[in-house]
Image (cartoon, rainbow, N blue to C red):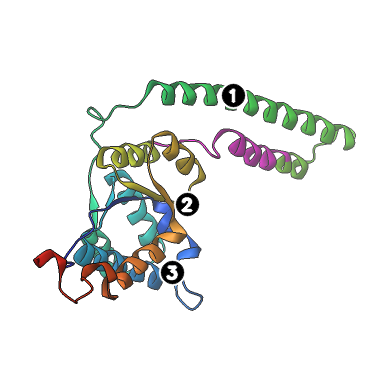
Amino acid sequence: MAEYPLKQRFVLDTSLFLSEEIRDDDETFEEGIERLLDTIAAARLDLNISCYMPPSIAAELEHILRERGVSEDVLGKLDTWVIKKHPDRYEVYIPAEVVYRFIDEMSDRVNRGLRVSEKAVRKAEESKQRSNGGSKLSDVDKVISDLREDYRGALRQGVLDSREDFDLLILARELNAGVVTEDTGIISWAADFGLRNLRGRAFPTLLEEYLMALDSPRPWSRGDDGADPDRL
């Protein structure tokens, strides 16, 4: 164990494990996940850095990993080294300003969603006119596909759109922990919650740097005469 252990906590999002940025060029999906979990384990044992997940996110991640054929051994490491904890929704308070902004933003997004829908209806009508009143299913399918993509971007991109996202932020606030995610919506709201946040792609490097620093000589640990100042 480290002589002066760090006491940092991080709450991890699913997007951390799914990001291609955390894997080396020659690594498979499973190898990248396993290397990340091994690094998390070393940080826990040597630096007292703890990583958490709300059970809702842990279940979502486990389901995705099983679908992608990740082995039981790797899933066991996930269960061992990432702590699952329910957020205390009754004791964690959220500033009224944050709730006010959320309501205001959702109202604006509903209006944007309506404009996207209106645009799609006009496209469908134009497509019908070009076909001289005939039925062209392929054109209609294209309009519907575009509508879904644009509507999703208008209403969901950059906003909290699931209970899992909210659980992550509440747990991080409860633990005074940093949020690790690639989700731009969570990053934005983490700032409003007053939380530290880190892009998932940078998290493995952060832990590796901490671990390398542990093995490096620390110039502040001894006096000029080589004596340990803590023993003076």
Amino acid type, label 2: Glu
Q: Position of residue 67 (x, y in %)?
A: 40, 60
Q: Is residue 6 above or below residue 148?
A: below
Q: Nearer the viewer, mark 3 or mark 2?
A: 2
Magenta run includes residue 96:
no
Q: Residue at x 74, y 30 (%)?
A: 119
Q: Residues within 10 Å of mark 2 (few under 14, many from 20)?
A: many
Q: What is the three-letter code of the residue carrying label 3?
A: Phe
Q: Give yes or no for contact between labels 1 and 2 (Cβ–Cβ under 8 Å).
A: no
Q: Specify the quadrant of the image occupied by residue 28.
A: bottom left
Segment tinted magenta in the rendering: 143-162
> Where is 118 relative to 207, above or below?
above
Which residue is painted at 59% across and 38% down in the image? 152
Quadrant assignment, res 219? bottom left
Q: Secondary structure at mark 1?
A: helix
As measured in the structure, the alpha-carbon distance from the residue carrying label 1 to the one carrying label 2 is: 24 Å
Tell me if I can see residue 70 in this picture. no
CA distance separating discs 3 and 2: 17 Å
Alpha carbons under labels 1 and 3: distance apart: 38 Å
Q: Nearer the viewer, mark 1 or mark 3?
A: 1
User: 56 or 94, which lies in front?
Assistant: 94
Q: Position of residue 159 (x, y in %)?
A: 50, 36
On-image quarter of the N terminus: bottom left
Residue that carries the numbered disc 2 in the rendered image: 182
Residue 212 place in picture, x, y as percent = 32, 73
For mark 2, give the secondary structure.
Answer: loop
Q: Is residue 39 left or right of residue 134?
A: left
Which is more N-terminal, label 2 or label 1?
1
Q: Quadrant of residue 98?
A: top left
**Which residue position holds label 1?**
108
User: What residue sits right under mark 3 in the picture?
Assistant: 29
What quarter of the picture does the C terminus occupy? bottom left
